[in-house]
Each structure stands twice: as C-alpha cells, then as structure tokens.
Image (tube, rainbow, N blue to C red):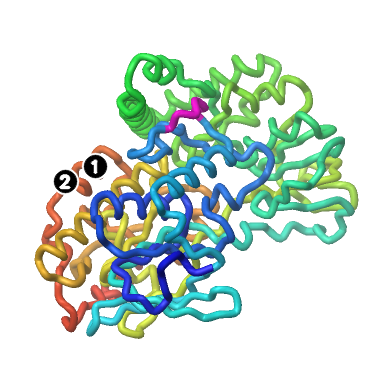
Amino acid sequence: MTASGLRPSEDLDVLIVGAGLSGVGAAWHLQDKSPGRSFAILEARADLGGTWDLFRYPGIRSDSDMYTFGYNFRPWVDGKVFADGPAIRNYVRATADESGITERIQFRTRVTAVNWDTQSARWTITAQHGDETQIWRARFLMLCSGYYRYEAGYLPDFPGMETFRGDIIHPQLWSEDYDYAGKKVVIIGSGATAVTLVPAMAETAAHVTMLQRSPSYIAARPSRDGLADFLQKMLPTRLAYTLTRVRNVLTGMFFFNLARWRPDMVRKGVLKEIRKELGDDFDVETHFSPPYDPWDQRFCLAPDGDFFAALRSGKASMATDHVERFDETGIVLKSGEHLDADLIIPATGLSMQIGGGMEIAVDGAVINPPDHVTYRGMMLSGIPNAVIAFGYTNASWTLKIDLTCERVCRMLNHMAATGTDYAVPEAPADLATQDLLDFSSGYVQRALPSLPRQGTVAPWKTYQNYVMDMITIRYGRLEDGHIRFGVAGDRARLAEPEAVAAAAE
C-alpha cells in the first residue's frame, strides 16, 4: 500500500530509504527540527524494524547497551541493558506510531536505482513495489537501509556441505517455527551472533558446540544497570535516561581508548575475568585469547555471564579448530576430531553493501563507491543532497545516526534560509585516503574493496569518537570550506574520483 496521502510522482523534500532504527529516527528528527518538510519512507520489507524485524534466531538481542543504543529523544524504560529483538522492534514501532511516521511508510517497496539531476536539483528514485515500477522525486535522499545485504549472509563454501544429512541454517535466514529441541547443534563462528545463540539454544538442545577458527574477546555484563534503575526511581524519566546515557558513552569511550593505549593490560584483565567464570581447569588460553588486540574487532558481551554459565553447565562446549570438511553426520576438523551434529548453524557473518545494493548515479553517470570519500562519516564526495546513515563500529550505532540526522536538518534549514538547492562535499584533489573502517573482522575485510574511502584528515576522516562528532557535526559550521551550496542548474562536480582512486593505490 502506498504511504497515506502520497503518490510516487510527488516532488518530496526528503525521501528516506529504510524503515529500521535509522529510518524511523531520521523521520522523527525531520518532523522535530525541520517541520513542514514533505517526506516518505520506502521499505523493502513488509514491516518496519529493519535488522530487528529480519533477525529471528534464538536469543537475538542488542550487543550495545540500550541507554546508548536507544534514541536520544525517546528514553529506554524497559530496564534491560541488552534488550531482545522483539523489545527493540516494539520500541521502534512505538516511536513510529506515536509520531505519525508509520503512515508515511510504503512497505514492500525496494529502491533499485537513484539518479541526481543537476539541472533540476532533484533525485529520481526508481523503486519496485510488487509488480509495479514506481518513480519518485525528491530534493534530498537519506539512505537508511543499513550496511549489509538482507537477502542472505556470508556463507563459506565448506567442503562436503552437500553430504550432511542434517539441517544447515544461516542465522540471517532463521525461521522462528524451527524446532531444535533434543538436537545436537554445532554453531560455526565466534562473534556476537554465536555468543548469543549458544546460551539460548543450550536450554533445549541436546548439546551445543561453538566451533571457532579463532577466539573473540567476551565479557560478562549485568543485564540490569543498578545506577539507571536508581535514577529512574529518583528523577524524571528523561533526565534519568540522559544521565545514564552520558555515563555509558563516557565509560565506553574510556574502555575503547584504554584498549588502544594498553592492549596487553586489557587482554590480561579480560582473561582474568573469564578464568573466574570458568575455573582453572578450562583452557582459557586456547578458546578465549584472540590473535588480535582488544577492539580490533567488536567485543562480545554476555548478559549476566549467560554464555559462561552454559559452558559451566556442560550443555555447551567449545572447539577451536578449522573445518576440514562436512560429512553425513557432522563436521571433521583439521585436528581429526569429529563434531556430531543434527543441525549446523554457520554464524559466519554478514555481506556488506552500501545503500541496499541500489545503483547510484549523478547526471546519469553511475558512481563507483571506492572512488569517493566520506565527508563527516555521512556524505560522499561529489554526491549532492544525499546522506548515508552509518553508525559507529566501537559504540552504539544510534549515537552516530542521531547526530547525522541533526546535521541533515541543519542543512535543510540552511538551504531554505539561503535560497540554495543542494549541498555537495568536494574533496581536495591531493587528499590522501585510507580504508573506510579500521576493523579486522572478516565481514569488514571482505567488503573494503567495494566501500567508499575515508581521508586522513578532518572532515574526511571518520574518527569513531562521539564527543568529537557531537562538537563538529552538531555544532560545527555548515559552510566549512569543504561543502559547496549551490542552486539548480549549477554543475555539481563529481569530486575528482580519479584522484581519489589514485590516492588509494
């Protein structure tokens, strides 16, 4: 159904792609800080929620605390520090419903291509709504479709997969009606998904084995925040939420920087806590001592130590080894050990992509993302009036999204006040560039060749620092010498993509 009161031919002020956490947040900020702007949200799925509507595997939850993962404008009052998927989905839905945003969403509509026209200073958006091809037009485009491919996650081609007589289910394709009770389960992976699945499935499965090629850093955290609960009782809800949020932001930044400054000290501290959880007889060095430094990849969190409790109970176990091959009854490891399985879950990661995989063009010329540089972690050089919602890798996703949306509203208001039609970041021809993400995770490393670049200096460098971004994005000058505001008909130069590509070599 088309969004209430809208038609695909309308000339919108803003078109938002994606009705997940980012897209609903973007719409809220538009209504609050740029009131009167016409907008619509196109969502490929049948419901809102994005990631939290897609993923339905056992135990699905946030791996960031909800006091920073929640919106800055809507207090999280559920009480759980790490909320489950349904609770987060309800939080997003309530935000959309209460703000009148839901009626601005057209579901089952996949954007396939967008093209910026300099003469009219408009985006033309091509979308598929069932069997109907729709054409939308908008002044500004917000891509809030996340950073990974929804259709399927990453699945390595393990030898012998076709011979396995049990079930193989990627977490991204999990069906809630699948019954694994009494089954022997092997989960391949060591990231947040695997750490979530193990304790959730160990409750009813015959046994769960987590098979990892290399370990991850895992830390136990309380599922309730004592200070937050106390503040909620003593203070108004919004003030209590804000204070907890500030405390958690600063604490997270402290531990991230400590890990970068003193990685050996943090590593020893993490392993010490794990030994307390599992006892001296458990081989902590083999199963919990990664070959990389803390925060070279995201930390995995175990609410109330549930992951370690599953291991202590004997209902779950770990194997640190490489897959030699699948066979009829399970997995043969390179060490020669055999893991019996009725169900194998390859929690092997995501497949990253920009803008939901749509084709992006400027004046008919299709862009190649690696030829462009990110501006303040939210726009791409040479691409006018377009923002990509991309959160933090070392902190809660939503912290950066809120700041990005605030900046968009400031830009829209500035253009209205100055009579300009577009804003385009223009990178210096001699700008040195580097990989977009400084993360060693497999899903990041696989995607880097297809992602935009970042510069080595501000505002082209993405610092992954909330306080710095809050100062520069929320309060910094809009006309900062790196972004050009113009009127329809001006030629929006494509920011020397050849120079950017040369700098990356």
Q: Quadrant of residue 132?
A: bottom right
For mark 2, what is the residue? 475
Query: Could you tell me which quadrant the C terminus lies in?
Result: bottom left
Residue 368 as seen in the image, left or right of residue 424: right
Residue at the disc numbered 1: 470
- Magenta region, main secondary structure: loop
Which residue: 35% across, 42% down? 399
Can residue 503 be seen here? The reply is no
Query: Badge 2, how many Cα within 10 Å: few under 14, some, many 20+?
Result: few
Q: How many marks?
A: 2
Q: Quick check: 503 above or below 290? A: below
Disc 2 marks which amino acid? Tyr
Residue 3, percent from left and from top: 46, 65
Q: Secondary structure at mark 2?
A: loop
- Numbered label attached to residue 59: none
Nearest the viewer among 30 and 202 is 30
Residue drawn at x 9%, y 66% is 418
Q: Secondary structure at mark 1?
A: helix
| Lower position in the chain sequence, tag 2 or tag 1 | 1
Q: Position of residue 44 (x, y in %)?
A: 54, 65
- Specify the segment rendered in magenta: 76-81
Which image quarter holds the N terminus? bottom right
Residue at 86% x, 41% y is 340
Give coordinates of residue 133: x percent, y percent.
Answer: 52, 81
Q: Is residue 400 magenta?
A: no
Residue 99 at least partly seen: yes
Task: Provide residue 223's location: percent of width, then percent of height.
Answer: 54, 24
For residue 366, what is the image quadrant? bottom left
Q: Inspect the image, locate mark 1, and give the three-letter code of the amino acid beneath it.
A: Met
Note whether 73 is above or below 203 in the view shown: below
